[in-house]
């Protein structure tokens, strides 16, 4: 089959159903909202200061908008109502050698909040199938599905989900990878007007977080406005540099330039109540555990020792100072 023939067959699936008559396995409920908020590290609806501050009280029966997809997920048993057109499309790509799949992105549109007790139904169509694309993973096609989500029959949200189905690149077929970088040549972070103050603090061995001067909420990473009250007014506050491992992942593969695998990336909960992502050092990656205490250290990668120097453009010229967290095992 030629590339043109395959592309024509794939395009013919656009507009055909991917799911028909889908139904949420459970109504929107407060328990799932609570679990999701705990897992994501956000406040439950109604837990904020809205009523106390004189603002309109926050409703406690409303699900966060970002939970839109939660109510339509099929779980381990799969999605009920999967249309044969989608299965045919996947089978066609499998026969063409595109047997691997990776999710790439999603878009959501919110039309009205979901409330506890709402019964969820949904339908999905194959919105588009891209022409053949060559990526670092291999050559294949992007499939976008568009799902309309209804609560008690009323359209409440639209969810677009995109995956790449591809034929994995053969060893030696892809372009030669860039030479591996040593830790001293680790890529430098992007510094812009929104986070420049944070990196100036790092250069002086100070870990700075933001505090809203309107409502007092502390936040990290640095943002131009407060996510709690919307105020653009804030001040920088130096964090104590103490915390615990809230979550973590140990990277083994793929190789990352400038990092020697395996290495640990931790989500650190500081005593100030904010969380930040950084490397966890001092303990073998396989021995890191959630709840392990950590303390802040500053490590210089590349260039000469001492405080970081800066070039004419304001970027680091002799290396980069980075905050990391040293973990401690109990009893050591």
Image (cartoon, grey):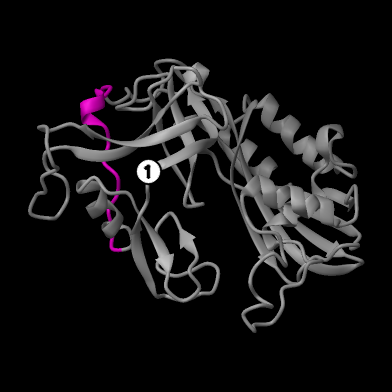
Residue 227, placed above or below residue 304? below
Q: Which residue is mark 1?
A: 241
User: What is the quadrant of the C terminus in the image?
Assistant: top left
User: What is the quadrant of the N terminus in the image?
Assistant: top right
Binning the other alpha carbons within 10 Å of mark 1 as few (below 14), some (14 to 19) or many (20 upward) gives some
Q: Is residue 152 left or right of residue 271?
A: right
Rendered location of residue 125, percent (x, y): 77, 53
Chain part drawn in magenta: 179-193
Q: Is residue 235 left or right of residue 245?
A: left
Rendered location of residue 107, percent (x, y): 62, 57
Which residue, as the protein is rendered here, is positioned at the far left?
312
Please tell me whether the stretch drawn in magenta is mainly helix, strand or loop. loop
Residue 160, placed above or below residue 95? below
Residue at (48% x, 69% y) in the render: 216
Q: Is residue 12 visible?
A: yes
Q: Is residue 190 magenta?
A: yes
């Amino acid at each position: 089959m030629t590339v043109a023939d395959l592309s024509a067959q794939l395009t013919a699936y656009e507009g055909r159903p991917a799911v028909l008559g889908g139904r949420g396995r459970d109504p929107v409920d407060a328990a799932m909202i609570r679990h999701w908020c705990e897992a994501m590290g956000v406040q439950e609806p109604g837990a904020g200061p809205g009523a106390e501050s004189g603002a309109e009280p926050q409703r406690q029966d409303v699900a966060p908008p970002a939970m839109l997809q939660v109510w339509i997920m099929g779980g381990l048993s799969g999605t009920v109502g999967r249309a044969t057109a989608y299965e045919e499309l996947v089978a066609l790509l499998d026969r063409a050698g595109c047997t691997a799949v990776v999710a790439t992105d999603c878009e959501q549109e919110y039309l009205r909040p979901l409330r506890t007790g709402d019964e969820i139904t949904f339908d999905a169509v194959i919105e588009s199938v891209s022409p053949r694309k060559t990526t670092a993973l291999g050559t294949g096609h992007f499939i976008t599905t568009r799902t309309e989500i209804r609560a008690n029959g009323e359209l409440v949200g639209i969810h677009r989900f995109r995956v790449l189905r591809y034929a994995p690149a053969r060893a030696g077929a892809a372009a030669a990878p860039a030479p591996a970088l040593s830790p001293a040549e680790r890529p430098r972070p992007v510094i812009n007007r929104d986070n420049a103050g944070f990196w100036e603090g790092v250069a002086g061995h100070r870990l700075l977080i933001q505090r809203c001067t309107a409502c007092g909420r502390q936040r990290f990473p640095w943002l131009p406005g407060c996510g709690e009250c919307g105020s653009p007014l804030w001040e920088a506050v130096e964090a104590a540099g103490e915390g615990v491992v809230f979550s973590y992942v140990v990277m083994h593969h793929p190789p990352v330039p400038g990092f020697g695998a395996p290495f640990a990336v931790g989500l650190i909960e500081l005593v100030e109540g904010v969380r930040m992502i950084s490397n966890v050092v001092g303990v073998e990656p396989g021995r890191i555990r959630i709840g392990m205490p950590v303390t802040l250290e500053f490590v210089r990668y590349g260039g000469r020792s001492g405080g970081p120097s800066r070039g004419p453009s304001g970027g680091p010229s002799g290396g980069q100072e980075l905050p990391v967290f040293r973990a401690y095992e109990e009893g050591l």
